[in-house]
Each structure stands twice: as structure tokens, then as C-alpha cells.
Image (cartoon, rainbow, N blue to C red):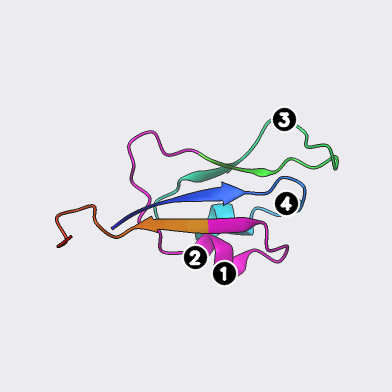
Amino acid sequence: MTGKIAINEDFCKGCALCVNACPQKLLKTAKHVSKTSYHPAEFVDPEGKCTGCGLCALVCPDVAIQVFRDRKAGGEKK
């Protein structure tokens, strides 16, 4: 199973709880400032290592993260 996430920068306050929770280390604090004056989390996964585990979304106190999973990837039956 592979996954990807979407971070709503309007809600993210840059607490970095998701950055610390990601077992694959695919999140970081962005260098840019959002329109709400925070450094939001940023998803960086050029190699497609995200498993869609959802830990980042579970720890997000601002409900700023959506997790999307592709169940057909990785040799699973279609």
C-alpha cells in the first residue's frame, strides 16, 4: 500500500507533531510562511515511501492533514 498526504496550510500552525510522528521521516517544517503567519508542515516524498499509515493525521491537533491510500500498489490483488 502506498499513500500520500495533503496539508491544509490554512489550518496548520507548524507545531511539528506530524514531523516527529512520521515513521518514514517524510514531513518537515517548511521554510516559507503561510498566509496565517506560520511555518506549516511540508510533505516531501520524491521516492514514494509514504505508506499511508495516518500517524501524521492522528497527531495533528488542527485537523490539517488528509491521508490518501492506494490499495492496489505494492503487489496487492486488484
Name the residue at 78% across, 37% down: 34
Task: Identify the mark nearer the N-term, 4 or 3.
Answer: 4
Q: Position of residue 23 (x, y in %)?
A: 41, 57
Residue at mark 3 to residue at mark 1: CA–CA distance: 24 Å
What is the crowding at mark 2: few (fewer than 14 residues within 10 Å), some, or many (at least 20)? some
Name the residue at 68% across, 63% down: 63
From the image, tell me which residue sits under label 2. 55
Residue 48 sits above or below residue 65 on the image: above
Name the amino acid type tagged 4. Cys
From the image, tell me which residue sits under label 4. 12
Q: Please tell me the numbered disc located at residue 32.
A: 3
Start-end of magenta stretch: 44-66
- Circles 1 and 4: CB atoms closer than 8 Å: no
Residue at mark 1 to residue at mark 4: CA–CA distance: 14 Å
**SS under mark 2:** helix
Q: Please tell me the numbered disc located at residue 58.
A: 1
